Amino acid sequence: MSKLIIDGNRCKSCGYCIAACPRDALSFFRQEGKLYDTVRVDDEKCTCCGSCYQVCPDYVFEIVETEGGAQA
């Protein structure tokens, strides 16, 4: 199983990832201490397809394998 990790400190709020997400799993929110919105993921909707990863110019996203992810 995979999980999408977001580095909010890198996000510049361009919105490319939100536009690219086929599942509408990403949205903007105001992170404490920032003057602009950053992106968050709805884990229930996200399938870790990598669309956001591919379009992000700031390397905000990482897709990691979670425990129990390897299946034979």
Image (cartoon, grey):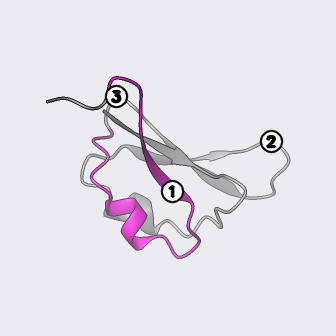
Q: Earlier in the sequence, mark 1 or mark 3?
A: 3
41 in the magenta segment: no
The residue identified by callout 1 is 61
Q: Amino acid at mark 2?
A: Glu
Q: Earlier in the sequence, mark 3 or mark 2?
A: 2
Q: Amino acid at mark 1?
A: Phe
Quarter the C terminus occupies: top left
Magenta stretch? 46-68
The image quarter containing residue 10 is: bottom right
Q: Residue furthest front?
A: 72
Which mark identifies residue 35? none
Mark 2: which secondary structure? loop
Mark 3: which secondary structure? loop
Which mark identifies residue 32? 2
Dot 1 crowding, Cα within 10 Å, few <14, some 14–19, many 20+: many
Give above or below for 41 relative to 62: above
Dot 3 crowding, Cα within 10 Å, few <14, some 14–19, many 20+: few
Q: Earlier in the sequence, mark 1 or mark 2?
A: 2
Dot 2 crowding, Cα within 10 Å, few <14, some 14–19, many 20+: few
Distance between the Cα atoms at labels 3 and 2?
A: 23 Å
The residue identified by callout 3 is 44
Mark 1: which secondary structure? strand
Q: Amino acid at mark 3?
A: Glu
